[in-house]
Image (cartoon, rainbow, N blue to C red):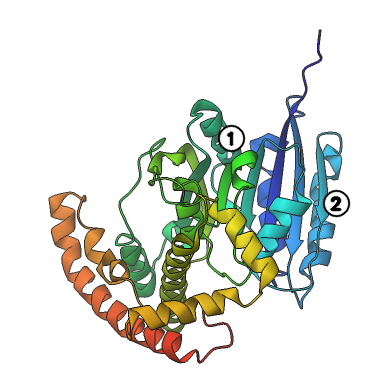
Amino acid sequence: MLEARPMNVSIGILAHNEAASIESTLVSLSKQSLFQHHNLDLAIEIKVVPNGCIDDTAAIARHALSRHFSNLAGAVSWDVCEIERSGKSRAWNTYVHIASNPKAKYLILMDADIEFISEDTLAFMIAALEKFPEALVSVDRPIKDIAFKADKTLADRFSLLISALSGNKTSEEQPAWLCGQLYCARATNIRQVWLPNQLSVEDGFLYTMITTNGLQNPAMPGRIILAKSASHMFEAYTDITRLLRHEKWLILSNSVNDMIFEYLTVNQANAEHAGQQVRRLDQEDEDWLGKCIDATTKTRGWWLIPKFILLRRFLALKNKPLAMAISLFPLSILAFSVDVAIAVQANHELLRKTEVEYWGK
């Protein structure tokens, strides 16, 4: 009779200059129910990947891991894998394809500046994939830290209202958007994907790659689902300058994602998985992404920002209850006006390439 083997789970924490938050994140992680009992059915590894850090992120991570996880040495292993060059996509590729346990069934990727709200978040995310074999990725609910403040400022309330315009609320165990702050993926499937090394926002890119099987099939939203009773907290932008800069960064990044998919589709050979296509392009020419944008600029003309970015505030109202949609409509008009102004700036930067890595933050 064969002896039952534990399920291998790998947790990758991608960090860039997160000395101020990495310990809090690891403390929060240590309180997850996965680590509260010596579960003989699980073998868990934690890999922290500091990338291009100029602070003490790596040292603090090592100390925190040793302090908070050493008593679970029999069930948990950990390591800090520093890489010299910065970039979340580069760190993602390093973790997924090199550092993570090749025997892992699930890979959990998370940012180094979040904290868990539910102590069962990771357990429920794994359970969702166990329950729904057709799903490839499970996500949780990301909630702004200001939502828990007793006395909210005007800026806090405005930030929370803007969140209401970001899309429709997904029901548990139903198709969902992928938030790059935290998600759990089937290792076999996520390892088919390679991110362009110069890409700074992976959410939209990963969502499309996963739901279309690397641009090989029509999108299947059910490949990504929201886990039941799972949530985490992240720091919200309330300073207007930071908020506007962040919005421009998102518009730039999503516009570049759109250009990449157009480029990959046109140049896709023999129904090749787009992940392998990206891997090959990165190996052949580190500046292929810039050349992709150059090529797209020549075909699109002077306006490079996709229409959906400008229409998103109104599209978010489409499936909301009528009363809520009416109450949010004035805010949608205001947000749309701001989006147009930011989009004009973003479009100008894409055309002139005024930043060394204009698709970055």
Comparing 146 with 355, the one in front is 355
Residue type pointed to by label 1: Ile
Comparing 246 with 93, the one in front is 93
Q: CA distance from mark 2 to mark 1?
A: 25 Å
Residue 340 in the image, given as x and y percentages of width and height: 28, 80
Label 2 environment density (alpha carbons within 10 Å; few <14, some 14–19, many ≥20): some
Name the residue carrying label 1.
126
Residue 157 in the image, given as x and y percentages of width and height: 34, 67
Residue drawn at the location 46% of the way across and 52% of the way down = 215
One can see residue 360 in this view:
no
Q: What is the secondary structure assignment of the residue under circle 1?
A: helix
Q: In the figure, is residue 75 to the left or right of 246?
A: right
Residue drawn at the location 46% of the way across and 67% of the way down = 263
Residue 88 in the image, given as x and y percentages of width and height: 63, 66
Q: In the figure, is residue 28 to the left or right of 82?
A: left
One can see residue 198 in this view:
yes
Q: Quadrant of the N terminus?
A: top right
Position of residue 354 relative to residue 184, above or below, is below
Position of residue 276 relative to residue 34, above or below, is below
Residue type pointed to by label 2: Ser
Residue drawn at the location 41% of the way across and 67% of the way down = 258
Q: Quadrant of the C terminus?
A: bottom right
Q: In the figure, is residue 211 to the left or right of 303?
A: right
Sequence-wise first label, 2 or 1: 2
Residue drawn at the location 52% of the way across and 82% of the way down = 358
Label 1 environment density (alpha carbons within 10 Å; few <14, some 14–19, many ≥20): many
Q: Which mark is residue 66?
A: 2
Q: What is the secondary structure assignment of the residue under circle 2?
A: helix
- Residue ranking furthest to the front: 270
Position of residue 44 relative to residue 236, above or below, is above
